Amino acid sequence: MIRVGESHRSQGLDGLKKVEVKLIMNQDQLREEIVRLKQKKGAIIFAHNYQSDEIQDIADIVGDSLELSRLAAQVEASLIVFAGVYFMAETAKILAPDKKVIVPEPQAGCPLAEMATRAELQALKKKFPGRKVVSYVNTTAEVKAETDICCTSANAVQLVSSLPDEEIIFVPDRNLASYVRQKTGKRVIAWDGYCPVHEEIRAEHLLEARAVHPEAEIWAHPECRAEVLEKADRVLSTGQMIKEARITRASEIIIATETGLLHRLSRENPDKKFYPARAEASCLEMKKNSLEKIYRALLEEKPEVVVDEETATRARAAIERMVQFVS
Ligand code: 13P
Ligand code: SF4
């Protein structure tokens, strides 16, 4: 067992790859090592808006799932450490097939994405032949491969409105599907999936938060239940919340989404106050990542995200249709 202290830090740890390394670095040393390794390897760290504060602070780019995937294709680095949940890193790999994408924790998966499988979607398509499949980006690569066009919470309504079809299949989030149905007036065959984190935010939480902060606006993510969206002043994706927070005249805002977003909102807008609609709304999957796991992933350049060629090609077509629609 080798303990990592000053002497190893000064010469780097790369030579110790094959040896079990017990980390006794403190957080500052860990941060220094991550930065050193990142520079040495020409790597870049991406973090989703829901990552813990310390991961957001060390990341090169913090963003929503689509922003990060699109940037993966644009950045020069050939090694990307993706701190988020697995489908996000997979989407990045699909859009940047020549780059090596590694994840700090391969078990960090999105329960919503895992509620839809390729076989189940194939069966639903057989039941409703001819209907286009619109899939939220929170899906596996395999489900994307069975999809006509992807969407995010930021563009789902506009994208479905733009389709000539009067009836579509929407996968996998039932709350986003019902919001799309309400806003577009179209017939939406909704998958029965949901995000456990957003599902647990209830109307009563908004009422309680409003009672404490009577002047605050309420902004909710469309993965929330209809009873929450009805009470919200605005329904916005995480990326839209970040942009709108910079320009809104509201000085206090109750945020109905995963609480990790509040770190970035508060950091970028110190003149405004942000309150969680539900303080317990934390995505445990997102929080499986840690600085130590980022360090190990960088050191060993694994675990690597791999998507088979056939699945990646079909999934890429569905994602690129969305990207073309947005741009
Ligand atoms: P974004 O698409 O806004 O990054 O959100 C993904 C997500 O997991 C929402 O819960
Ligand atoms: Fe998935 Fe919900 Fe976590 Fe987002 S917050 S990654 S949708 S479980």
Image (spheres, rainbow, N blue to C red):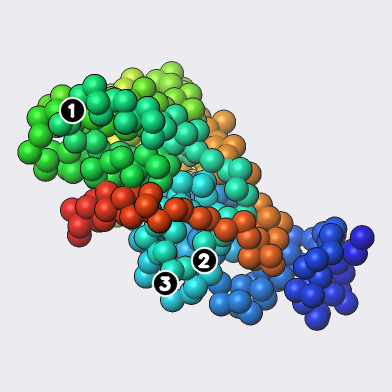
Q: Mark 3: which amino acid?
A: Val
Q: Quadrant of residue 96?
A: bottom left
299 to the left or right of 166 = right
The Cα–Cα distance between marks 3 and 1, rounded to whole angstroms, is 40 Å
Helix, strand or loop at mark 1: loop
Element on which disc 2 rests: strand
Say which residue appears at 10% left-offset and 34% top-offset: 165
Q: N-terminal of the two: label 1 or label 2? A: 2
Residue closest to the eye, 98 or 296: 98
The verdict on label 3 being within 8 Å of ligand 1 is no
The percent position of residue 174, horizontal first and vertical second, equals 33, 26
Q: Is residue 218 left or right of residue 78?
A: left
Q: CA distance from mark 3 to mark 2?
A: 12 Å
Number of the front mark, 3 or 2: 2
Q: Position of residue 268 (x, y in %)?
A: 45, 58
Identify which residue is drawn at 17% across, 43% down: 158
Pointer 1 residue: 129
Instruction: Pinpoint residue 322: horizontal percent, then vertical percent.
Output: 24, 51
Q: Are marks 1 and 2 in contact (CB under 8 Å)?
A: no
Image point 18% across, 43% down: which residue? 159
Viewer-side residue, 126 vs 164: 126
- Structural crowding at the residue carrying mark 1, measured as other residues with C-alpha within 10 Å and reported as few (<14), some (14–19) or many (≥20): few
Please state, as top left, top right, bottom left or bottom right, where the N terminus lies in the image.
bottom right
Please give the label number shown on residue 100: 2
Q: Nearer the viewer, residue 281 or 279?
A: 281
Under mark 2, the amino acid is: Lys
Q: Would residue 54 be seen by someone viewing this image from the given angle? A: no
Q: Earlier in the sequence, mark 3 or mark 1?
A: 3
Quarter of the view holding residue 163: top left
Seen at 48% across and 74% down, the residue is 77
Q: Which residue is mark 3?
A: 75
